[in-house]
Image: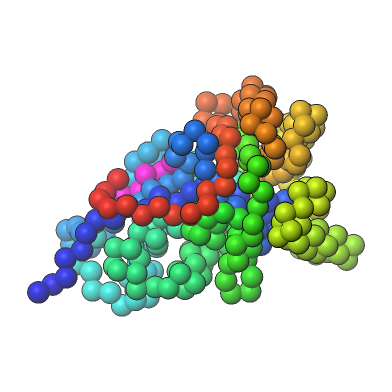
Amino acid sequence: MAKQYEAVTVYAPASMGNVSVGFDLLGAALAPVDGSLLGDRVSVAPGEQGLSLHCCGPYVDVLPAKLEDNIVLRCAEVFIEKLGLEVPGLKLVLEKNLPIGSGLGSSASSVVAALGALNAYFGEPMSQDDLLLLMGELEGMISGSVHYDNVAPSYLGGMQLMLAQRAQPLPSFDNWYWVVAYPGITLSTAKMRALMPQQVDLSIALTFGQQLATFIDASHRQDEAGALAVLKDVVAEPYRAPHIPGYLAARQHLQALGCAAVGISGSGPTLFAVARTRDEADAAAAYLQDHYLLNERGLVRVCRLAQNGIEVSKGEV
Ligand SMILES: Nc1ncnc2c1ncn2[C@@H]1O[C@H](COP(=O)(O)OP(=O)(O)OP(=O)(O)O)[C@@H](O)[C@H]1O
Ligand SMILES: N[C@@H](CCO)C(=O)O
């Protein structure tokens, strides 16, 4: 008798690439403290002949007009082909909860939710390490480069450091709040990467290496002052900051409000601020709500790290 498959839904949290100090190597998953969703959901269920995709959610209108250009369908095609699966019919639903080109890891969230749901639906045929590598490849197909600093934390949770072939969790500081603000405009990752020079000065390379090494060491030793002292981006931010409306002014104000660090989330335009108390986080959020948002599509969230990565549940979106 043919195996009966059951519908499954996966939620994949938003993520901040780079975290200032680890360009393309370090990322963190986000969980709003108010319990709201900040990430896409994809469900996979038995369907009629072939693959079908239905999209819904608050940011459905910014998805590619043609369904065949949606990365979720590509994920299903690649997954099925790679594993040589016989699939009579598959119904996919994408609930698009993240804005595109935001710096919140929007395409990564769709990729992680889709591949996570497909793997769960088919009984986990792929190992965690192999699935992560596939997630990075698919993210690379649409963002212009293979980088894991969004897919790894969205899939695995917390803060993740990308080593040569696998992700390694990095302890963070439990008292930190991560306040994120998306102004409501789109900046494509590929264009924000094109702003950066292809060659890096030796002095910049040395500072980058030293800061990343110091941050990793300080995080493991829970040396908060040591970690904060080097939470700075010398590689991408100098080239990107002038192209993000209001970023430099907001950074200055947030520092004056007492935020311990401020940086660009991924390639922007979302910014993040580290606050060490809830009062400080709320003050930063109020400032950003009034001064950083450019339209009604913008959002501000006070977050902790999403420690568990994806959430798998039974049934459809
Ligand atoms: N399900 C999807 N979610 C998001 N983007 C998608 C999806 N399917 C296709 N795309 C396309 O992928 C591209 C994603 O571009 P880009 O990498 O700049 O955005 P992003 O992943 O939202 O960036 P960020 O990491 O800054 O949030 C866009 O051209 C978008 O139309
Ligand atoms: N590390 C990537 C993240 C994109 O979200 C970049 O900064 O281009």
Residue 174 x, y percent position in the rendering: 63, 46
In the rendered image, the vertical position of residue 199 relative to residue 186, given as above or below: below
- Vertical side of 254 occupied by 118: above or below: below
Residue found at x 45% / y 51%: 12
Task: Judge whether residue 66 is colored magenta.
Answer: no
Q: Depth check: 247 or 122 in front?
A: 122
Q: Which residues are magenta?
A: 92-97
Residue at the image point whose x is 69% and y is 44% from the top: 264
Q: Quadrant of the N terminus?
A: bottom left
**Residue 61 picture location, percent across and down:** 41, 38
> Going 59% across and 74% down the picture, which residue do you hit?
165
> Residue 72 location in percent, x, y?
39, 56
Report the coloring of the rendering.
rainbow
Q: Residue furthest top?
A: 290
Q: Is residue 62 visible?
A: no
Position of residue 57 in the picture relative to residue 287 (left or right): left
> Which residue is most to the bottom?
84
